[in-house]
Image (tube, grey):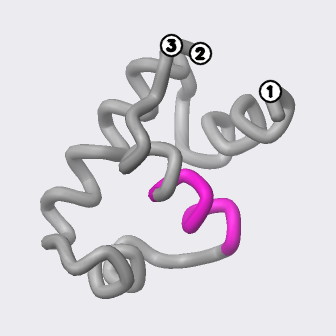
Amino acid sequence: MQNLTNKEIEILNLLTNGYSNKEIANEMKISTHTVKAHINCILKKSDAKNVLDAALKFLKRR
């Protein structure tokens, strides 16, 4: 997993805590489109097939 930005880590943490894209957008005061863009970067950097796979890889690295 390549280095994630602080925003990407924050989004991944929220995802692992069950937040939806809309809830993440509200929490971080960004648009849902921006959340999706960050998620796409997370998936690419982590070489994950989906958000769950990315979250599992992230949690294993902790």
- Name the residue located 80 percent from the left edge and 26 percent from the top edge: 61
The mark found on residue 12 in the picture is: none
Residue 15: horizontal and vertical position, in percent? 57, 63
Vertical relation: 39 (above or below) 17:
above
Vertical relation: 16 (above or below) 24:
above
The quarter of the picture where the N terminus appears is: top right
Q: What whole-number distance in Å separates the C-alpha atoms at marks 2 and 1?
A: 9 Å
Q: Are marks 2 and 1 in contact (CB under 8 Å)?
A: yes
Foreground of the two, 50 or 8: 8
Q: What whole-number distance in Å separates the C-alpha atoms at marks 3 and 2?
A: 4 Å
- Name the residue located 39 percent from the left edge and 21 percent from the top edge: 44
Q: Main secondary structure of the magenta part?
A: helix
Residue 49 picture quarter: top right
Read off the residue under disc 2: 1
Q: Which residues are magenta?
A: 11-17
Q: Would you say residue 61 sits in the magenta stretch? A: no
Residue 13: horizontal and vertical position, in percent? 61, 58
Residue 42 picture quarter: top left
Name the element at disc 2. loop
- Which amino acid type is marked by label 1? Arg
The mark found on residue 61 in the picture is: 1
- Which amino acid type is marked by label 2? Met
- Of callouts 3 and 1, which one flags the residue occurring earlier in the amino acid sequence? 3
- Crowding at dot 2, Cα within 10 Å, few <14 / some 14-19 / many 20+, comes out as some
Q: Would you say residue 15 sits in the magenta stretch? A: yes
Read off the residue under disc 3: 2
Q: Are marks 3 and 2 in contact (CB under 8 Å)?
A: yes
Foreground of the two, 1 or 49: 1
Residue 53: horizontal and vertical position, in percent? 67, 36
- Which amino acid type is marked by label 3? Gln
The quarter of the picture where the C terminus appears is: top right
Vertical relation: 58 (above or below) 51:
above
